[in-house]
Amino acid sequence: MKVTACLLLMASTAMAKPREAKAFSLFSVVTFPNDECTTVMDPTMRGLCITAEECTDQGGTASGNCASGFGVCCFTTVTEAGAITNNVTYIQNEGFPTAVLGTAPAPAAIPRAFMVQGGANICQVRFDFDTAVFAAPAVNVVEDVANGIVAVNGGSCITDQITVTQTSTAIGNGFTELCGVLSGQHIYVENDGADPAATLNINTGAVALARTWKILVRTIECDSPSKAPGGCLQYFTGASGNFQSFNSGIAGAILDDLLYNVCIRREAGMCSYTVREARSGAAPDSFEIGADAAGRVAVANCAEAHIVIPNSGIQAPEFCGDVLTNVDGNTVTSPVTGNGAQFQIRVVATADQIGTVGTGFDLIFAQTC
């Protein structure tokens, strides 16, 4: 009763003031950070915490509340090529999760460009390939002029290509094009304030083949704790984890033209990290790159495809072959230890490497001290 009376008195006092006096408001504006949130429709799907009005204006779908009920978790998807202006947006094929372009007659080749809005405060864009199944890279083909067969290096993306173009002068991406199975992978793209920050190109060739894609796009501000160190195509956090080559799996093959760093955030109190094969004996092979058909290791083979584990305490830290073996041909005691100021593994695959089916890597890291 006291509260009610007080409010009535305040209201009557406000009404009694002259018209030119400042109005008294019983309401205040509520503000909250536009953080990433989990949708209620699917706990694996992400959205952005904004007001319900903003979500509607941006063409999103409200999926649960956030910010103590003052905001909604806004889920945004796009299927048509064009500009992406909202952070935390999914690029999906039409009708996802149903596959597309898989029925005869062969579809036309289709280029699609998704331009991610940038700006002075956007330093990176992260693309998460939640689901991404495209045409596999070519297998190694020897030239046969008499029969009209042109030589093709295994690992080249001749049917479908996933590429990233930039308008900034920031460091390059570390790959020419991606294809095959990319589900579960992610990449970081640097930006130096340009707009658009990056353009993701999905080019599908004129081949009837079932394809699906759902790619999460995040823009990362320059002062964000989620920002990866410069020069990292992939960035992993946590005391342990798993990283794989692009297009890995039973029918996978390592891709051509790769030169990138897999970076690991050094956790508090950690001094070094170890790298080991994810499995032994079971298919697909956990490590098979840069060797000849017999699985033999030589410097010439390693030059075409290998990984580098810096500061690992051995004379030649380049590893290739059908086991985690360095260029000297010696099997290093597993797991291999790396250290240094930056925890990172470099991946190298030239245009001359033979990316046959079954090549690639599936490795586990663990931080130690």
Image (tube, rainbow, N blue to C red):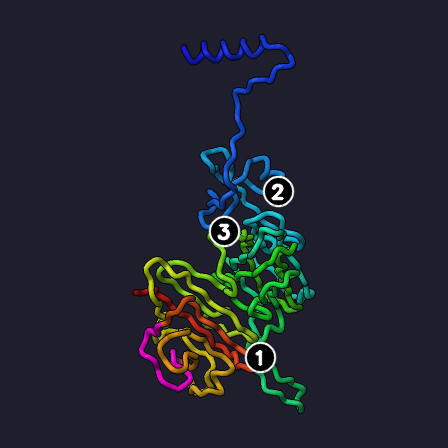
Determine the image quadrant of residue 330: bottom left
Q: Which residues are magenta?
A: 323-337
Residue pushed farthest left? 369
The residue nearer to you, when weighing 222 against 36, is 222
Identify residue type, mark 3.
Ser
Few, some or many residues within 10 Å of mark 2 (<14, 14–19, 20+): some
Mark 3: secondary structure: loop
The numbered disc on residue 351 is 1
Question: Percent x, y for residue 260?
Answer: 51, 70
Identify residue type, mark 1.
Ala
Locate the C terminus by quadrant. Answer: bottom left
Magenta-drawn stretch contains 333: yes
Looking at the image, do the residues carrying marks 3 and 1 touch, with CB atoms under 8 Å apart?
no
Mark in front: 3 vs 1? 3
Mark in front: 1 vs 2? 1
Q: CA distance from mark 2 to mark 3?
A: 26 Å
